[in-house]
Amino acid sequence: MARMANLYDVSKCTACRGCMVACKDWNKLPAVIKPFKGNYSTHEDVDPDTYTIVKFIEHEDALEDIQWNFLKYQCMHCSDPVCKKVCPSDAFFITEWGAVIKDSQKCVSCRYCEYSCPFMVPKYSGREDMVTKCTYCYDRVENGATPACSRTCPTGALTFGERHKLLVQAEERVKYLRANGYPNATIYGRHELGGLNKLYVLTDTPDKFDLPVNPTVSGTVGFWQDIVQPYFGWLMPLALAGSAVSFVTTRLLQNKSGDHGEGGHE
Ligand code: SF4
Ligand code: SF4
Ligand code: SF4
């Protein structure tokens, strides 16, 4: 199977949020009402029960006063994913077509992936006691279907297909947009972090869509990859043993001070 991608064209998105609903429906995620924050975004960020969101980003515009940009946001399915690199229990794998999948059986909830992801996507779910993120509808795609969000989008803003073909499509679209009032139109995801498998056609520069202009990988990633990961097998029991000793010592000290305390009251 060829390398696949989702192309999201912001110029076609009406922010209907059909993709958000379809994602929740397919992944059986509960609807959770969030408090009103003074803008039209229903969610400030992805969360354990919401793998994708549509951001409403407001910018002051010299001509139009306020300009609204919409952005569908989720895991970018990086071709060289940092989450996979730092995971000490090897819980992530990449499918032959490019989806970055987390194996729930292997996740130990350490949350290193959450802290290292340049897009801050993985989120810890207390309900499931593990980290969650967009699955790229792996189960649908492996059975010949398209991701639920792409399948649902009523305006054609989301297209799923072979990555190299979508990039040609994106180039054409950017050319059209630049010639029709959007001189800063650009493609996002072609080169960032070695290439993302969620591609974007933006009508303006990435910062206008709350996307990192030059996403980078933290310098501590090498430490986790070279030191923690190889020795995780014996570091973990060691850490657990340390916790057990600390627990027993604390208890003994508490009991001892408790004895003194009772004596003091007599
Ligand atoms: S379903 Fe399509 S048009 Fe609606 S918010 Fe999602 S990407 Fe935008
Ligand atoms: S966006 Fe974050 S969670 Fe998704 S593949 Fe890239 S590093 Fe991993
Ligand atoms: S690919 Fe699937 S899991 Fe990911 S945002 Fe779309 S519907 Fe949700």
Image (cartoon, grey):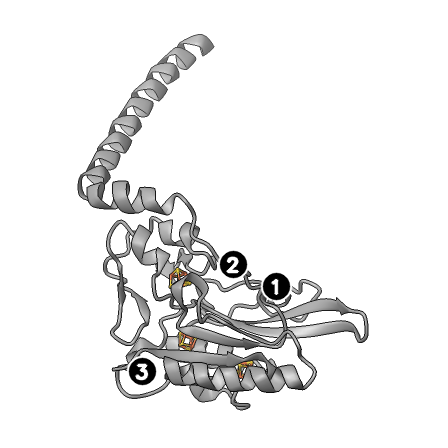
Secondary structure of residue under mark 2: loop
Q: How far is mark 2 from mark 3, CA to CA? A: 32 Å
Task: Count residues near mark 2 (Cα–Cα under 10 Å), then give few for <14, some for 14-19, many for 20+.
Answer: few
Nearest the eye: 144 or 264: 144
Residue type indicated by callout 2: Asn
Q: Which residue is mark 2?
A: 214
- Relative placement, left or right, of 183 versus 71 is right
Front residue of 44/84: it is: 84
- Would residue 65 be found to the left or right of residue 261 on screen? right
Decide: is 199 above or below 156.
above
Disc number at residue 140?
Answer: 3
Q: Earlier in the sequence, mark 2 or mark 3?
A: 3
Under circle 3, the secondary element is helix
Q: Mark 2 near mark 1, Cβ–Cβ under 8 Å? A: no
Find the distance from the CA under tag 2 to the CA under tag 1. 10 Å
Q: Are marks 2 and 3 in contact (CB under 8 Å)?
A: no
Q: Which mark is residue 207?
A: 1
Question: Seen in the image, is 228 located left or right of residue 113?
Answer: left
Q: Which residue is drawn at the image coordinates 21% and 34% (left, top)? A: 238
Q: Amino acid at mark 3?
A: Arg
Q: Quadrant of ligand 3?
A: bottom left
Q: Residue at x 54, y 63 (%)?
A: 45
The mark found on residue 149 in the picture is none
Q: Is the CB of the residue bearing disc 3 within 8 angstroms of ligand 3? A: yes
Q: Nearer the viewer, mark 2 or mark 3?
A: 2
